[in-house]
Amino acid sequence: MKISKLKKNKWIRWISNKYVLILIFFLVWMFFFDTNSYFIHKELNEDIESLEKSKDYYQQEIKKDKVFIQKMKDSNEMEKYAREKYYLKKENEDIYIIQHEDSIKKENKNE
């Protein structure tokens, strides 16, 4: 008796229709199991966003480097940069490096 009551139920009849079952199976398959599933698309979209962010970062770095290269084409700027960054000097010239107390690492007092 219970089966006959179930068959008469409107929702059960609708869901047990073979076309609806095929549609449900298709949707579940496409959403979870297919190679083009929702989760794979979501992961790929996240990858695209992160790559676009890194692309923007590297484009900004390229602009900075181009400005730096243009600046280094001037020999005075190149000399200034070499003196400040690499402590280079001309012949017969002395360089004194001044360090402040707060920039020097303090040795252990126990030693």
Image: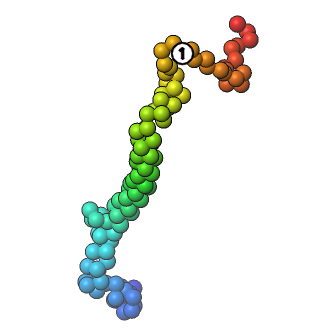
Q: Which residue is mark 1?
A: 93
- On the picture, is 45 further left or further right than 105? left
Q: Residue at x 61, y 19 (%)?
A: 97
Q: What is the x, y in percent for residue 22?
A: 26, 79
Q: Residue at x 72, y 21 (%)?
A: 101
**Could you say which quadrant of the image residue 17 lies in?**
bottom left
**Could you say which quadrant of the image residue 51 lies in?**
bottom left
Q: Residue at x 43, y 55 (%)?
A: 56
Looking at the image, which residue sits at the far top?
111
- State the residue in front, 73 or 21: 73
- Where 16 falls versus 111 (above or below)? below
User: Could you tell me if residue 59 is visible in this image?
Assistant: yes
**Could you say which quadrant of the image residue 68 lies in?**
top left
Q: Quadrant of the C terminus?
A: top right
* Secondary element type, mark 1: loop
- On the picture, is 110 further left or further right than 93? right
- On the picture, is 39 further left or further right than 22? right
- Where 103 falls versus 69 (above or below)? above
- State the residue in front, 84 or 20: 84
- On the picture, is 81 further left or further right than 59? right
Q: What is the x, y in percent for residue 110?
A: 73, 9
| Amino acid identity at mark 1 | Glu
- Where 25 falls versus 91 (above or below)? below
Q: Residue at x 48, y 33 (%)?
A: 76
- Label 1: how many residues lie within 10 Å, few (<14), some (14-19) or many (20+)? few
Q: What is the x, y in percent for residue 81?
A: 50, 31
Total number of numbered discs in the rendering: 1
